[in-house]
Image (spheres, helix red, strand yellow):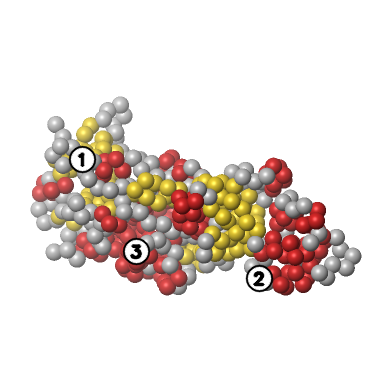
């Protein structure tokens, strides 16, 4: 017979808050909640907290970004619906908070914020876990949420004992708040598989299909490019889709293209793929030069051959040179006007996104129309959704983590102010 979680058996003075999921948003919520008012419990299906947080750190552990608040919030979609959370706990607040728990940071050349050299992702996670301990947070590992039963109780499968499986139920009506922080659908190895979506649909809650974001884009390169340029970088370029342009770099892959210079275009690329079945990626290999200036330099050929001309006068990398040479005829290759145009307006066709499990993040999940401005489910008062399980988008570079932190802190403030 399932056990019903009764707050009165735990503490007569405190109300009970149950947090389902142990990712970034959940951890920061648990740190922020007032432990003199609430008994706080995190239910995590893995044997450790912050699995995706640790995996993300392997690729360059930037925690947030140092740009202005005004530019920072513009990186989010939908911007207006995330503004309150960001204003409550923005990037400067986060840097100060990290310092308060012993994590020193520095701003890199790309304006990304990193922990000081020598600090590993596990060190940051351990510091956060120490704050959880100080706040009296109870953590239940090995508790996999299985949905609601016929009594509207939250049912977990507890596999903390080897070879056994017991059911534990938490009654929504007897918890003062239940917060879901179950993640999106990328990097399944961390437990972020989106399997929770069907459980919400059974409660009449809309859940949008998951789609890849911050991922590689499929481009059908010709065989010459594939054979010669896979793994080569395109540096100091401007990448555009629609009206959005990003300066940075990307890498040519057998699948297509990926990298920090193209990840922020994910929203635009998805929209174009949905509308037209393809998206056009424009690359400006020399954003610091006008086409007229490039043409003028190319006309000053002298005794140089075309390759020498492009590399000495325009300072094109070998990768860029090959990208142009391998798609042009002999006549085009020797035409300064055509070369100048290609350097400024090189276009390739994107035909698909990488598989979701290869994406850094996903969009989809709980849409904002199902939530109040405080992330409370309209159809399940007392239940909240935060983090990547909500349908919002942001590029890499610290923006994804920052909003998870912001949502957790903001909801903590909301709940702390409740009477």
Q: CA distance from mark 2 to mark 1?
A: 57 Å
Q: Residues within 10 Å of mark 2 (few under 14, many from 20)?
A: few
Q: CA distance from mark 3 to mark 2?
A: 34 Å
Q: Which mark is residue 148?
A: 1
User: Residue 288 shows which numbered tag?
Assistant: 2
Q: Are marks 3 and 2 in contact (CB under 8 Å)?
A: no
Q: Which percent across, then down, holds residue 1? A: 14, 31
For residue 134, above or below residue 167: below
The residue lying furthest to the right in this view is 303
Q: Nearer the viewer, residue 29 or 180?
A: 180
The residue at which mark 3 appears reads as 82
Residue at horizontal 34 percent and vertical 63 percent from the top = 82
Residue occupying the point 31% across, 29% down: 162
- Whichever of callouts 3 and 1 sits on the residue coming sooner in the sequence is 3
Q: Residues within 10 Å of mark 1 (few under 14, many from 20)?
A: some
**Residue toward you, 224 or 153:** 224
Q: Nearer the viewer, mark 2 or mark 1?
A: 2
Please, what secondary structure does the residue beneath circle 1 have? strand
Residue 235 image offset from top left, x and y in percent: 65, 59
In the rendered image, residue 348, in percent from the top left (x then y), is placed at 61, 53
Say whether disc 3 or disc 2 marks the residue closer to the N-terminus.
Answer: 3
Front residue of 257/408: it is 257
Q: Residues within 10 Å of mark 3 (few under 14, many from 20)?
A: some
154 to 296, vertically: above or below: above
């Amino acid at each position: 017979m399932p056990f019903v979680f009764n707050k009165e058996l735990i503490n007569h003075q405190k109300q009970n808050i149950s947090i389902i999921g142990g990712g970034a948003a959940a951890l920061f919520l648990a740190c922020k909640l007032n432990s003199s008012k609430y008994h706080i419990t995190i239910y995590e299906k893995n044997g450790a907290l912050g699995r995706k947080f640790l995996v993300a750190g392997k690729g360059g552990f930037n925690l947030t970004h140092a740009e202005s608040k005004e530019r920072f919030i513009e990186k989010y979609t939908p911007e207006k619906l995330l503004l309150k959370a960001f204003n409550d706990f923005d990037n400067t607040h986060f840097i100060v908070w990290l310092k308060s728990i012993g994590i020193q940071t520095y701003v890199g050349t790309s304006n990304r914020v990193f922990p000081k050299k020598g600090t590993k992702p596990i060190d940051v996670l351990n510091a956060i876990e120490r704050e959880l301990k100080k706040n009296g947070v109870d953590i239940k590992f090995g508790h996999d949420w299985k949905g609601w039963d016929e009594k509207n109780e939250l049912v977990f499968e507890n596999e903390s004992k080897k070879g056994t499986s017991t059911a534990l139920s938490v009654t929504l009506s007897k918890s003062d708040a239940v917060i879901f922080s179950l993640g999106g659908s990328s990097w399944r190895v961390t437990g972020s598989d989106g399997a929770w979506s069907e459980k919400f649909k059974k409660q009449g809650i809309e859940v949008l299909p998951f789609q890849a974001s911050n991922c590689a884009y499929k481009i059908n390169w010709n065989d010459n490019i594939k054979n010669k340029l896979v793994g080569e970088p395109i540096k100091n370029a401007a990448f555009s889709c629609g009206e959005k342009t990003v300066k940075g770099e990307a890498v040519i892959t057998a699948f297509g293209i990926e990298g920090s210079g193209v990840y922020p275009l994910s929203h635009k690329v998805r929209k174009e793929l949905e509308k037209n079945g393809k998206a056009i990626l424009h690359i400006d290999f020399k954003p610091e030069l006008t086409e007229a200036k490039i043409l003028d330099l190319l006309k000053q050929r002298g005794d140089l051959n075309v390759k020498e001309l492009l590399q000495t006068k325009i300072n094109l990398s070998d990768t860029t040179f090959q990208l142009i040479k391998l798609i042009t005829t002999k006549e085009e290759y020797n035409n300064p006007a055509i070369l100048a145009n290609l350097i400024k307006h090189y276009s390739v066709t994107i035909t698909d996104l990488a598989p979701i499990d290869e994406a850094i993040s996903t969009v989809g999940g709980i849409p904002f129309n199902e939530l109040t401005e405080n992330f409370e489910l309209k159809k399940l008062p007392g239940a909240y959704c935060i983090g990547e399980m909500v349908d919002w988008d942001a590029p890499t570079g610290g923006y994804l983590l920052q909003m998870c932190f912001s949502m957790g802190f903001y909801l903590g403030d909301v709940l702390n102010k409740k009477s």
